Amino acid sequence: MKSRLRNTASVAIALGCAALTGCANPPSGGIPHASQQTTSGQLVAADNSIETLVRMGDFTMSRGDLPSAISLYRRAHAADPRQKLPLEKLGRAFSIIGSHDEAAGAFRSLLEIDPASAVGLRGLGNAYLALNEPDLALPNLEAAVAVSRDAASYSSLGVALDMTGRHDDAQEAYQIALEQSPTDLDVATNLAISLSLSDRHDEAVQLMRRTANSPSATIRHRQNLALIYGLANRTDDARAVARIDLDDISVERSLAYYAMLQRIEDSRRRAAAIGDSSGARLDP
């Protein structure tokens, strides 16, 4: 198939800034006093330098204290709203905690400062994907690919293409991502799911079996092998794989879920249902 994704330098950068509610100011929420301690025990210094605040935010995030990290990134953004790094950090932190609307706002603000920011374009696209808005995600992710041509952008673009029913183009995007990052099991998993969405079940099973048998595979990769078997209507194989990690009740629930997916004829709706499932992997 002739590539339609590699030559994307002329793709227009879509900012997606129509609904920029609150993007110009720090997100709502209290800023800790200079003497306040974070829940991880780290003392917040009375130093409003952006570098210090971002560094402290990174430290608290590494300790698992995301609320305090977000507060510190907010302070860094307030200290100079034209600096890109605090907005990058805020967007990522909001994404991690599942506050995708706020993540989108941070990335929109970043794109106001730097319309060609690959981090901002990919981050905003991923936030739209998490909000089940693939049509809004797609132009941002196409622009991210045009700017960076990196594996992460191609992988996210593949998800958006799958969610809009363009499975052949999605598979091409995943293949390009795998060329750049051949050991990325999550990209391989998304490719396997995409093959299943386009009824290429034998190829999907072969790829997902290799992925699930990798030394670095996790429970999630194994359960996605069960998903691929389920989508292929290979119920006995799906049950055998699911039992590796799940109890009997969870196994039966998974099998019922796979049967429900099979009944969804529209591949776009099926992709959205897979992406909404905590046990499946169709995400950036």
Image (cartoon, grey):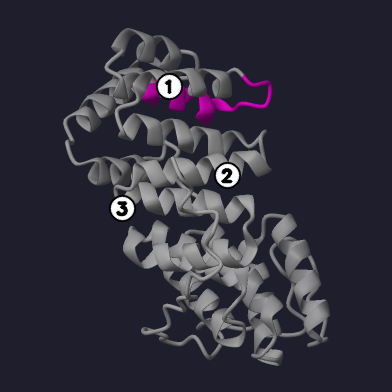
Q: Seen in the image, is 38 located left or right of residue 232?
A: right
* Label 2 element class: helix
Direction from residue 115 to residue 256 in the image, left or right: left
Task: Report the number of discs.
Answer: 3
Q: Disc number at residue 140? A: none
In the rendered image of this protein, does residue 140 appear above or below residue 15? above
Q: Are marks 1 and 3 in contact (CB under 8 Å)?
A: no
The answer to whether any part of residue 282 appears in the image is no
Residue 163 percent across, percent down from the top left: 33, 50
Find out whether residue 222 is within the magenta segment. yes
Along the viewing direction, whichever of 3 and 284 lies nearer the viewer: 3
- The earlier-in-sequence mark between 2 and 3 is 3
Measured in 3D between alpha carbons, the distance from the residue under mark 1 to the one under mark 3, in whole angstroms, is 21 Å
| Residues under numbered marks 2 and 3 in contact, where contact means CB atoms less than 8 Å apart | no
Tell me if mark 2 has few (under 14), some (14-19) or many (20+) residues whose alpha carbon lies within 10 angstroms of its own: many
Residue 36: x and y in percent read 73, 78
User: At numbered mark 3, what does the secondary structure look like: helix, strand or loop?
Assistant: loop
- Give yes or no for contact between labels 2 and 1 (Cβ–Cβ under 8 Å): no
Q: Residue at x 43, y 19 (%)?
A: 205
Query: Quadrant where the N terminus lies?
Result: top left
- Rounded to the nearest angstrom, the CA distance separating label 2 from label 1 is 17 Å
Q: Amino acid at mark 2?
A: Ile
Query: Which SS class for mark 1?
Result: helix
Q: Quadrant of residue 204?
A: top left
Residue closer to the observer: 193 or 173? 173
Mark 1 residue crowding within 10 angstroms, few (<14) / some (14–19) / many (20+)? some
Residue 212, can we see it? Answer: yes
Q: What residue would you read off at disc 2?
A: 176
Q: Which residues are magenta?
A: 214-228
